[in-house]
Image (cartoon, rainbow, N blue to C red):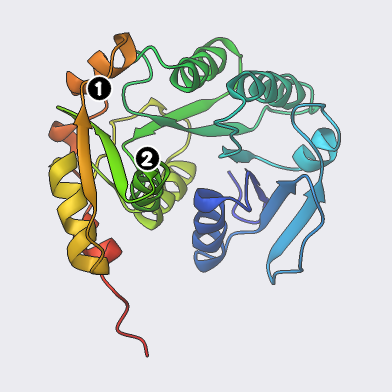
């Protein structure tokens, strides 16, 4: 792969995508972002307006590209993820030259947890494996900001309702972005080793860490939620303790900033 060829980032304006774009720019790579809407100009970053779910703008976005980091995702509409990936792969195979290397970000446990969004992510993995394009898949655990956001979403008034018997392994988004760019430079590698945060934390420990960081006390109620998906979470299929390669802890991520 030539270093002057642009790397296309789908979902380049999202939580992970922004970090990936910044990391590529730091490493001196040409970057192209596929986005549904026009946005501000960023030095070193080209922006193409398009939509993977309809195919609009995808051919233009892929022109001259030798690698794609596919971060675009819609957790609330998991079927869109499968459609988007299929359109991306079909377009990648029709570029007229060698198909670009597609690096895909997935989630630990997508093949073992029967949750609709996870099923869609696993289907995308299967499309990549069968899609006749060079590919790499990295599965990671939960991003630090997502963990804090999830707790807020589970809070009803003064009470936070938590699934009992569950643990998390939060990982730093910037570290994941750096790993994805490493995989661009490594070339097609298939499914690589999972990447998890440095600590496995019970939901109790997550709440305690947030309370220490924010000074906000939570009234918590623990509920044993029914269903196969929650049973899989209790079994720890969302964790990868043998691949705790992340460095920044959850406590470090949520600690109050010393700036100002």
The residue shown at (63%, 53%) is: 13
Task: Check disc 2: other Cα within 10 Å, few if <14, some if 14-19, many if 20+.
Answer: some
Q: Residue at x 68, y 25 (%)?
A: 84
Q: Which residue is mark 1?
A: 233
Q: In screen coordinates, is 257 left or right of 42?
A: left
**Residue ranking furthest to the front:** 157
Which quadrant of the structure image shows residue 80?
A: top right
Percent position (x, y) of residue 36? 78, 45
Q: Residue at x 59, y 54 (%)?
A: 3
- Quadrant containing the N terminus is top right
Q: Nearer the viewer, residue 104 or 81?
A: 81
Res. 248 visible in picture:
no
Q: Residue 60's mark?
A: none
**Residue at the extreme bottom of the image, as rendered:** 260
Q: Is residue 150 above or below residue 84?
A: below
| Front residue of this view, candidates 165 and 137 | 165
Residue 38 found in image quarter: bottom right
- How far across and how far down the image is residue 30, in percent? 65, 59
Q: Quick one: quadrant of the C terminus?
A: bottom left
Between 113 and 217, the one nearer to me in the picture: 217
- Residue 197: x and y in percent read 23, 45
Q: What residue did someone put label 2 on? A: 154
Q: Residue at x 47, y 30 (%)?
A: 188
Task: Establish if 158 lies above or below 233.
Answer: below
User: In the image, residue 204 lies at what x, y percent?
Assistant: 14, 43
Q: Secondary structure at mark 2?
A: loop
Structural distance between the alpha carbons of marks 2 and 1: 16 Å
**Figure check: 185 above or below 45:** above
User: Is residue 48 left or right of 66 when viewed as pictured?
Assistant: right
Q: How many marks?
A: 2
């Amino acid at each position: 792969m030539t270093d002057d060829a642009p790397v296309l980032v789908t979902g380049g304006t999202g939580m992970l995508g922004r970090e990936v774009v910044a990391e590529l720019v730091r490493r001196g790579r040409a970057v192209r972002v596929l986005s549904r809407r026009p946005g501000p100009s960023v030095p070193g970053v080209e922006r193409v307006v398009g939509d993977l779910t309809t195919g609009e703008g995808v051919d233009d976005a892929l022109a001259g590209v030798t690698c794609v980091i596919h971060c675009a995702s819609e957790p609330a509409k998991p079927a869109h993820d499968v459609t988007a990936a299929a359109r991306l792969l079909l377009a990648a195979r029709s570029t007229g030259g060698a198909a670009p290397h597609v690096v895909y970000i997935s989630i630990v446990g997508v093949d073992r947890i029967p949750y609709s969004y996870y099923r869609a992510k696993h289907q995308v993995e299967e499309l990549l494996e069968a899609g006749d394009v060079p590919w790499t898949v990295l599965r990671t655990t939960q991003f630090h900001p997502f963990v804090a956001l999830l707790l807020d979403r589970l809070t009803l008034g003064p009470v936070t309702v938590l699934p009992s018997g569950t643990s998390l392994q939060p990982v730093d988004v910037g570290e994941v972005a750096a790993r994805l760019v490493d995989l661009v430079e490594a070339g097609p590698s298939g499914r690589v080793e999972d990447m998890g945060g440095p600590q496995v934390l019970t939901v109790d420990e997550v709440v305690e860490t947030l309370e220490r960081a924010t000074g906000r006390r939570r009234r918590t109620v623990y509920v044993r939620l029914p269903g196969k998906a929650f049973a899989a979470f209790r079994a720890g299929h969302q964790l990868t303790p043998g691949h705790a390669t992340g460095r920044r802890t959850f406590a470090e991520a949520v600690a109050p900033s010393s700036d100002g």
